Every structure is written in structure tokens, then in C-alpha cells.
Amino acid sequence: MNKFIYLITLFIALMSNACYKSGGKCEEPLDIKDSEIVVVFKDKTTNKYLYTEVSPLYNKDSLKVFDERGRSLLVANLLRSAPNNQNEGIYVIGFGRIFSPETDESSFRSEICKDFIVKYAFNEPADTITACFKSEKTKCGSRFQTLKVYHEGQLLDSVNNQISAHITVIKN
């Protein structure tokens, strides 16, 4: 009888640690290992988008993003309509992962800030995007309790309980 009670108790304990969302399992749990910053780049002088479908100011395949240690990050792009002109296709650029398990575990205790280096072309000076975040574990994964993204000291986005931020960077 004691074994039976032990097995039931163990089963209940295991099930209570499973990921549930309003009575059902988590559909797609958030995990900061999938974190990213999604960016639209514009030129300061012309106010034009850098990465357009037709006649871009820069080649989207030349864009490189590096972490503080110089490691290249995964860069993806998605074609969308420009917010102010539905007939103009622009590329929205995503890069990540923002959180690195090797270096960012302290973000579960306090906020940390990291710089990401953006190279538009090999012969141009780099740009810097700064992300400050505090992480938290959830029953179904993990997320940023807070995530703030800066460019040239200006706050571009601040989100809570997410794994990504969406910003527009104005390139000088």
C-alpha cells in the first residue's frame, strides 16, 4: 500500500511541474534561448529605409551583427510593406540570440546590459545597439522580465515578459 501511495504522490508531483496554461499544456512556451531584436533601419539624412526590395541603400546580405566577444549572431530578414507606403517592400531584420547561457546566467538575479555591434558594410564604421534585461524562469520556459533596447543612448523599446523587442534604428 505504501508503494501505491508513493507512486501516486510522485505522479502528482511530476504533473504539477509540467507546463500548463489555463488548464491545458503550454502551446508554444517562451524561451530566452530564442530571444531576438527585430529592427527596421532608416537613413538619418534621407529618411529612407536602408533595406528595401527595390533599389536598397545597402545590401541586406552585407549586414553583420556581432556580440561583445566578436561572435557573429544569426541574422534573418523578412520582407514587409513599409508602414507609410504599402507599395514599398522593406526588409525587417532580426538578430539573436540576445541571451547566452554561457555568459548571462546572472540576469536571473539582476539586470545586465550587452552591446551588439552592427556592421552595415565592411568599409563603414560599426554601430552599437545595447540591450539591458532581467530574466526569469517560468513553468513553461523563460522570458525577459524586462528588456530595454538603446541606440546612441536613446531608449527605443521597453517590453515586459517577452523574448524580443522591435525597434527602428536611424543610421547616421
Image: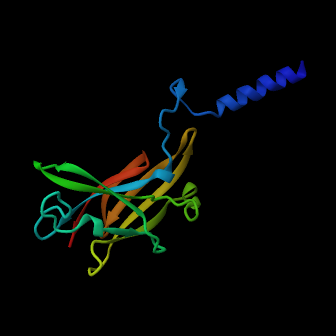
- The single residue placed furthest to the top in the displayed view is 1
| 1 up-or-down from 107: above or below | above
The N terminus - image quarter: top right
The C terminus - image quarter: bottom left
Q: Can you give x and y, in whole percent of width and height, for residue 90 in the image?
A: 19, 55
Q: Quadrant of residue 106?
A: bottom right
Observer-nearest of 98 and 151: 98
Q: Quadrant of residue 130?
A: bottom left
State the scheme by which the image is colored.
rainbow
Q: Can you give x and y, in whole percent of width and height, for residue 45 in the image?
A: 12, 71
Observer-nearest of 36 and 87: 87
Q: Can you give x and y, in whole percent of width and height, for residue 40 in the image?
A: 25, 58
Which residue is pictured at 50% across the width and 47% down the height? 31
| Total residue callouts | 0
- Position of 55 compared to 138: left or right? left
Observer-nearest of 157 and 38: 38
Which residue is pictured at 49% across the width and 55% down the height? 134
Which residue is pictured at 77% across the width and 22% down the height? 8
- The single residue placed furthest to the right in the displayed view is 1
Q: Can you give x and y, in whole percent of width and height, for residue 66 in the image?
A: 41, 70
| 99 up-or-down from 1: above or below | below
